[in-house]
Structures are given as C-alpha cells and as structure tokens.
Amino acid sequence: MSAATRSLVTQARTQVAHGDLPAASSTLDRALRIEPSNPLLWIELGRLRLAEADAHQAEGCGRKALALASGDRLAQAQAGRLLADALRVQGRNQEAREVENQPFMNSSP
C-alpha cells in the first residue's frame, strides 16, 4: 500500500471512530481511485458498508476483495470473513458457512 493510500485509510478509520461514516466513505473512495486493485482497501470499504448497515454492498466488496487477493492467503482470509459476515447479516447462513469452510479461511488474520 502506498504512503498516500495508507494515510487515507488512517484518516478513514479516524472518521469512523468519530462516527462520520459518510466522510470515511468518501476517503476510502479516494484511496480506491489510487489503488483500485488493492484487496485490503475493498475489505476496509466492506467493513464500512457493514457499519452503515448495507450488507449487500459489503458482500460486493468482499467478493471483489476475494477476487483481487489471489495468492495472498491473509487477504483472502480477511475478505472471506467480510463476505461471511455480510452473508450472515442477510440471513444467508448456509452460504456464510460455505465461505468459512474454504481452505483460505484457515489463514490467521
């Protein structure tokens, strides 16, 4: 992750901590314009979407992160947890369990 992107993620986390979810969303969107292929940014955005109670968008972010995390087992595991959480919020518990049973989910965060 570049220094600029890392700074934006830090800023977004501060905004979330202060309850400013719209500002955090804008900040993460800026980070994604810099590094659109970074799965960790999609995971951050997905977690934010869950905090905003938008499980459908969080699911999309999780799926995008998982697709981009090919070969990075840690990022795959984080994306899988996000995806499973988003599915569970939607009441799709069986699908969440299927994600959690994937081999990449055995990686430590």
Image (cartoon, grey):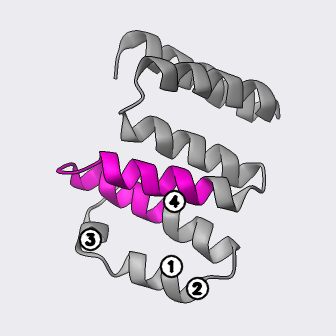
Residues in magenta, as a range: 58-81
- Cβ atoms at labels 2 and 1 below 8 Å apart: yes
Q: Residue at x 70, y 28 (%)?
A: 24
Q: Main secondary structure of the magenta part?
A: helix
Residue 63 in the image, given as x and y percentages of width and height? 45, 57
The residue lying furthest to the bottom in this view is 94
- Which numbered tag is attached to residue 82? 4
Q: Which residue is mark 3?
A: 106
Q: Tell me: 98 left or right of 68.
A: right
**2 vs 3, front mark:** 2
Rendering coords of residue 3 (x, y %)? 39, 11
Residue flagged by tag 4: what amino acid is it? Answer: Leu
From the image, tell me which residue sits under label 2: 93
Three-letter amino acid code of the residue under disc 1: Ala
Identify residue type, mark 2: Asn
Few, some or many C-alpha atoms within 10 Å of disc 1 (few <14, some 14-19, many ≥20)?
A: many
